[in-house]
Image (tube, rainbow, N blue to C red):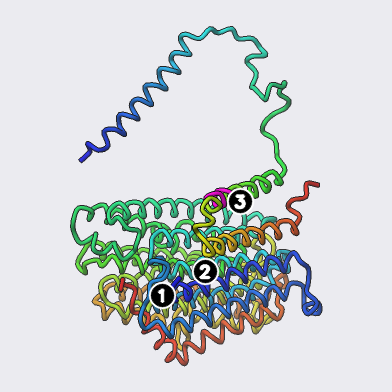
Amino acid sequence: MLVPYAGVALMIAVAIALAAVFLLGSIYLGPRAPNPVKSEPWECGTVSVGSVRRRFSVRFYLIALLFVVFDVEIVFLFPWAVLARELGWAGFSAMAVFVAVLGLGLAYVWKRGALEWE
Amino acid sequence: MSAHDLAALVPLVILTVTGALCLLLEVTGVPVGARKLAPRSHIVWCSELGLAATALVLLRLFARADQPALAFAGALRLDRFGLGLGLVVCVAAALAIPVAVGFLRSRDLDRGEYYATVVFAALGMIALALAADLVFLFVALETTSVAVYILAGIDRRSSRSPEAALKYFLNGAFASGILLFGVALCYGATRSTAIGALGPALRGGDGALLASAGLLLVLVGLGFKVAAAPFHMWAADAYDGAPAPASAFMATAVKAAAFAALIRVSVNAQIDAGSGWISAGWIIAVATMTVGNLAALAQRRVKRMLAYSSIAHAGYALGGVVAAIGGHTPALGAVGFYLLAYTLMTTGAFGVAAFFERADGAGCSHDEWAGAATRFPLVSLAMAIFLFSLAGVPPTAGFLAKLNLFACMIDGGFYWLAFVGVLNSLLSVYYYLRVLVFMYMRDPDPQLAGHGGAFVGAGLAIAALAVLLVGLLPGTMLDLAAQLRDVAPG
């Protein structure tokens, strides 16, 4: 009963072994020469300033949420665009309703002022 | 797209458009025709009209649903049971909106978003009541839940409302996770997400154990949503902490829709009358009504008492569900009728709490309601009607619904269940009437204030009249409820 899953088990074992080899290899083989600058938390190559535990404007979240919504829209639009001709008017009308709902949401967010940064 | 697909789509599309309109009316400014009304009255009217239109469509579908039909490749089932509970959801939403207006205005929360969220939640609930497919059921449940989390936390400047929303959200998220795990197991056992496929899988074959585990997890997930003991812990904090108008909606509509899903899943599982599922079901029913009632006895806040009372009422309804699972079909109609009566009286009672509630949940304790009857005679009268109905005193809807439900339990052979139910409802008389003792027999508290208005008055009056009317002239409603027979696959 479990035989078909042997491949999955083998893959998990290989994945764990491979990760262990890489990690242990870098621990034991890698040269190490720490200095104060190297030990600092890395922040895009610049010298880090202040603490990370500070409050962010709620606008970041709004923008991120909107981004996710439109990102998902793209995920749906691309496969449809590839098959647009085959799907015909049924596909087009379904997509039109979907985009219209999103457009409505965008209009609401816009009018509500969530896109203004000031 | 078949005719059934279109028919199933109409109520959902009406609600989607209504919700979107509420949002757009909020941001576009007041239309010329509505300038003379109080601010945002037009949005209240818009949501009410949308709900009324939906209810009319559901009634029409109800009348034509003598032959149940599947829509969207089995995702929805248009039968009288689902449509009837969809109507209960419409009633709950249509009553919860007007009783909210006074409170929302007093806290500067009177925004189109509130009404839109209620409408979107109602959309999810109606879909939930009609769901015949586990994946569709999950999506409908999440549509409902996410909207209701927002309603619970709508009073974000208060200290209690966000806490209630967070507790509700965390518990609800766990419940959804458990339910989804159950759905996955059911799919593994039946190779289908159709609810109707559960019954055959449970009765034998390779997948019976897997299907039982799946069914158990799905029922536990739904048990969280109806606040059945031992999954009721969140309910008191969530209903007490959330603004009272939101609680009015959460405690009624969510419960009606979740009961619809619970009944559809459990009845479709076609459990043998003698199996352990039935015993487990009635132990949970007894535990739910007893825990709710005992905890309600000790409460000093009316809102919290109502929260525990809603747990107790879920217990009575669960008793009916157990009778229905045990094969006594009329119990389905009795539960439906019970949920309607419960919706009317609980929306009303929470609506009165919304009338008195001030910032941070003040104005909702027994002490603060002392002598309310001398200063707010009409609201107190309405509250008296709701409380008598909740306690099950004739001639109210609550009495008749309980009578009907307990009679069904006895007919189904669940004598002990009915006996414990009657004992429990005797117990509940104490804590319901205690509120009236405070309201009618104590010296008035000058601090007490209410936020009335035409909408609140109309909402409470309609709820109170409906409680009396259903209690005095129950014929039509009982006839309609008797038609909620059929949830099994056809």
Residue under circle 3? Answer: A69
Residues at marks 3 and 1 on the same chain: no
Tag 2's secondary structure? helix
Seen from the viewer's position, the closer of residues B296 and A24 is A24
Q: Nearer the viewer, residue B440 or A82?
A: A82
Mark 2 residue type? Leu
Q: Residue furthest front?
A: A85
Q: Image quadrant for the N terminus of chain A? A: top left
- Who comes first in sequence, dot 2 or dot 1? 1
Amino acid on which the number 3 mark rests in the picture: Val
Secondary structure under the numbered disc 1 in the rendered image:
strand
Q: Are marks 2 and 3 on the same chain?
A: no
Locate residue A107, reporting x and y percent. 71, 59
Q: Residues within 10 Å of mark 1 (few under 14, many from 20)?
A: many
The image's mark for residue B78 is 1
Please tell me whether residue A94 belongs to the stretch shown in magenta: no
Instruction: Classify residue A23 as left or right of residue B367.
Output: left
Label 2 Cα crowd, 10 Å radius (few <14 / some 14-19 / many 20+): many
- Residue drawn at (63%, 58%), measured in percent from left and top? A102
Magenta span has A76? yes
Q: Chain of mark 3?
A: A
Query: Residue B467's spot in the image, x, y percent?
Result: 51, 84
Alpha carbon separation for disc pair 2 and 1 = 33 Å
Residue under label 2, please give it: B306
Q: Residue B11, labelled with which disc? A: none
Residue B230 visible to the viewer: yes
The stretch in magenta equals A74-79
The answer to whether A82 is drawn above or below residue B24 in the figure is above
Tell whether label 1 touches label 2 (CB within 8 Å).
no
**In the rendered view, would you say B149 is above or below B349?**
above
